[in-house]
Amino acid sequence: MNRSLLLKLLSAVIVFGAWEIAGRVPVSYAFPTFFESMYALGVMTFDGSIFTAYAETLKPLVIGVAISAFFGITIGLWVGLSNRFEWLFSPIFVVMQAAPLAALIPILVMAYGIGLTSKVFVVCIMAMPVIVLNTASAVRNTPASIKDMGKSFLASDRDIILKIVIPAASPVIFSGLRLGISAGFIGAILSELKITPTGVGDIITYSRSIADYPSMYAAIFSIIVLAVLFLNLLERTENYLFEGNNRGYVTD
Amino acid sequence: MSQTNDAFAKAVPLDADSAVSVRNVSKNYGDVEALKNLSLEFPRGQLTSLLGPSGCGKTTLLKIIAGLLKPDSGEVEIEGKIISSPGPDRSFVFQDFALLPWASVLRNVAFGLELRGVAKSEREAIAEKYIKNVGLTGFEKAYPHELSGGMRQRVGLARALAVDAQVLLLDEPFSAVDEQNRRKFQEDMLELVRGENKTFIFVTHSIEEAVYVSDQIAILLPRPSRVSEIIRPTSFRGTGKENIRRSPEYLDIVDEIWASLRNYVE
Amino acid sequence: MTVLGYRLPGMSSLLLWALLWEVVGRTGWTFFIPPLSDVFVTLVDVIGTPAFLKAMYETAYAFLAGVFFAVIIGIPVGILIGKSRLLDELILPWVNIFLSAPLTALVPVLMVLFGFGMKSIIITTTLFAIWIIILNSRAGVKQINRSLVDMARSFGATPMDAFFKIYFWAALPEILGGVRIGVIRAVKGVIIGQLLISIVGFGALFELYSNNFMMKHFWAVLIVLFAVAFSLSEFLAYLERRVSYYAASR
């Protein structure tokens, strides 16, 4: 067993141990122990309720991320390639990126009700800016010398975009997508807690209202673990595909 | 009488047979004059070096010849045609190699042909041949990040040769390559110039390198940029690559160029 | 973009979008988009009201407190794990986890532990900001040029000297970069906290406006909020550029 893995395990034992002890003291009536929470998670897993909850939670997330990815990358490419588009659109996304867009939720609820549409919108406004901005800056920052290379070997504008700019930008576009998904998770959970409790948000809200704190902690624990594992998987995929910004792109 | 004529003809290899002519080219970047009214002839089948201190506009000139930059005034004529954009008659070797990091060596070498619409099997056959010529057989499937700097530049060279252009433009091709590889490259350049019957235009800031590989050396001086001198080594070209650095003329020319450039070192 | 040889300033297209907003608002296409000019008129009215000032004050307080704790804890922790391999291996995995975790899910826990008030919002803000500050401070210390450290030692610098004269300055561009991103995240955190604990600050104001369908008021407050957030992020980016002029040449 190597040192790094050992230390990771040790670190997990310390943190979860501290959680357990803090729960046993207890530091607060609303602070269950680690094992109580894991037991609650086990119960939810075996009666299947957690799976139905995730099916509900992931719906707006998946739809929202798909929409953001499609429009985000398309707009990002335009903004990156054309000065006119950049002038027109990039200020909007720069402001969106800096602004607390969560404040738009009350308006979205007024306009689209408390259903799926609003939740998809929340995911989109959270995920889109970083996807657009990453795509645009990746396209803008294509190394000048490989574009010159393309031109000197008589590439058409279309060739330069398809064979040079887009492949060169892919790693950054992909990591923008990953950051977008990360923000999308925040949006999906925020919308379940703020708009209407469904899915995992429902478990959290309901178990809080009946003071079933182990279940509440279990649900929160599970969503964080799920998000972190998924984002980690994406990051690994990214490293594999673009290892040192390379390969993955031999298109023919 | 006839003897003097003979000697004269030998001393100045005729400009009549120029592959590339640069006439009265000027280029400004904002207020900075990169090139001012510069004219230069490049003899066919020979290697001409553009040598000078940094900021003398040598890379600008090369990019204008490549058609990557447009001159503010003046013109560049290649094989009798005035050019204004990149063309199939020229190919470029980049200082930073400019390889596609996501493409294999084979695809990188074939990339120029790919852009010209040559069928896959045909362009890969041609690429194979040039990969072999530059000594990279066995690395066809490798990716640029798996190669050393010297090997990467061999890929860049093979790519430029594969499109079979008449004029090769090399922008400080060996400056990012380690010393031993650079020496090997310089020797290979001599063979390439002899074997390929192409016109080479070679930008460098190394005096030794310029004198070693060139049939003609154009010294460019900055502010305002101009051709200050054209030197044509004569005696050591035929003596074999091992002997060049020992030839008195080689040493004299290196000293002479250093004497004229030393005032421009910042 | 340039028009007739004149270079348009970077953010000038926002004027065009504002015009579009005004036109759409004037057509009365939807109740949710009142004309921008009306929103601005409302804005002037709203800004002086006690409700707005109270919300602004509470938000600023929670935000500043949250950022303060994030910086005070984040930078030393980052420098510490950057210098100690053991601590690095113990703590870094958690920093990475919380950096990408959906922290909104933790707000309900904070609510039951710390009550429906300022305390929870401050902690939310700190949680949003702190991880990137730790990570960047660590990266800043890690990238310090080895020969710079050796230089200090060869001239006989004491550890204290080395820390304040070398490490801190050498890592400063990264640390400031982390603080900038952390502050932007903190703005989002403070608003998210207020939305979920909606009896404080703008959260309460939003409840009030949306329950009474006061669209102009709502947009007026949003514009103020976005403008402040954007100016803050631009200002920090400016500061960072001022300091990181030497980042590339270290």
Image (cartoon, coloured by chain):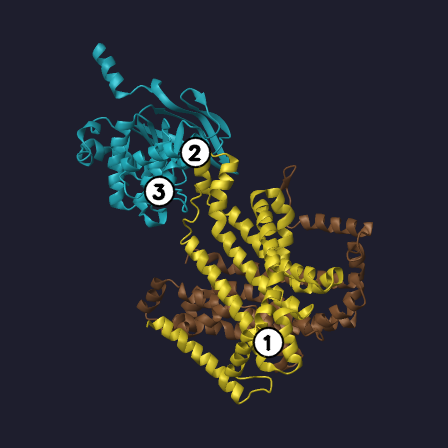
Chain colours: A yellow, B cyan, C brown
Real-space Cα separation, disc 3 to disc 2, in angstroms: 17 Å
Which chain does tag 1 point to? C
Work out which quarter of the rendered image holds the N terminus of chain A and state it: bottom left
Of residue C188 and residue A74, the one placed in the foreground of this image is A74
Q: Position of residue A238 (x, y in %)?
A: 45, 56
Q: How crowded is mark 2: few (under 14 residues within 10 Å), some or many (20 or more)?
A: many
Q: Name the residue under label 3.
A: B105
Residue A170 — which label?
Answer: none
Residue A153 — which label?
Answer: 2
C197 left or right of A7 in image = right
A238 left or right of B1 in image = right
Q: Which amino acid does label 1 sit on?
A: Ile
Real-space Cα separation, disc 1 to disc 2, in angstroms: 57 Å
Q: Position of residue C128 (x, y in %)?
A: 57, 69
**Which mark lies nearer to you, 3 or 2?**
3
Q: Mark 1 points at which residue?
A: C123
Real-space Cα separation, disc 1 to disc 3, in angstroms: 53 Å
Q: Position of residue C19 (x, y in %)?
A: 75, 49
Task: For mark 2, give the secondary structure.
Answer: loop
Q: What residue type is labelled 2?
A: Phe
Work out which quarter of the rendered image holds the C terminus of chain A and state it: top left
Above or below residue B43? Residue A54 is: below
Q: What residue type is labelled 3?
A: Val
